Amino acid sequence: MDFLANHIEALIFCSPNPVKEEDIRITLSEMLNTEVPQEDVAGAIARLQERYQSPSFSFSPVQLAGGYQFMTKPEYQASIGIYLRQQSKKQLSASAMETLSIIAYKQPVTKSEVEQIRGVSCDYAIQKLLEKELVEIKGKSDGIGRPLLYGTSRKFEEHFGINSLKDLPTPKDFSADENEIGEEK
């Protein structure tokens, strides 16, 4: 029995968000009333990941958004896909997805910049993305009126299964010159 790995497994399982190695180490150190080395935590996580490679498990601990979370294995995507399609009212609309992709690639970005790219009002889409916590307010622009700046959140990374914004796919025809807003002075 692997005492440390079992406790880490329980911590990852009970958390609705990815659990960082440092948070695991701090929690275990407090529980055991002694300092738990980071190498021991990393080793136990590696043993956990190896254990879950077995085909008898439909999920495994995956490094995601700077921490670890249990995720289902790719071979179960068909049944999960059907289930998720059945939950359609929770899905993002096409306009929300367009707005979210602009924010993800251009962040930090103002609402008016998003609207200029999309060519339509984005009030409703941005409000829905804020409610779903996929987007967050990153600050205020130095521009006239000091409009709010929007960017993606950690929940965005979790939702799309990426570790950081660097993991976003690179659009084929994406170049900074073609996507500048306004005219240079």
Image (cartoon, helix red, strand yellow):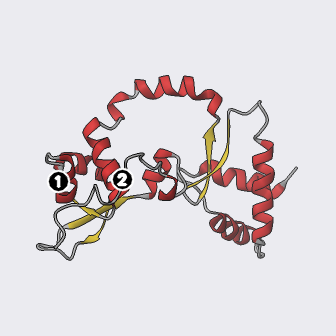
The residue drawn where x is 48% and y is 22% is 82
Asked if residue 99 lies left or right of residue 49, the reply is left
Q: Position of residue 135 (x, y in %)?
A: 34, 55
Asked if residue 153 lies left or right of residue 114, the reply is right
Q: How many marks?
A: 2
Query: Which is more toward the observer, 117 or 152?
Result: 117
The residue drawn where x is 32% and y is 42% is 97
Residue 80 vs 159, above or below: the answer is above
Asked if residue 107 lies left or right of residue 19, the reply is left
Image quarter where the C terminus lies is bottom left
Residue 125 vs 35, above or below: the answer is above
- At label 2, the amino acid type is Glu
For the question of whether residue 135 can be seen, the reply is no
- At label 1, the amino acid type is Gln
Kindly identify which residue carries mark 2. Answer: 133
The residue drawn where x is 17% and y is 62% is 182
**SS state under label 2:** loop
Name the front one of labels 1 and 2. 1
Extreme residue toward the left, this view:
145
Instruction: Report the disc number at residue 116.
Output: 1
**SS state under label 1:** helix
Q: Position of residue 101 (x, y in %)?
A: 34, 48
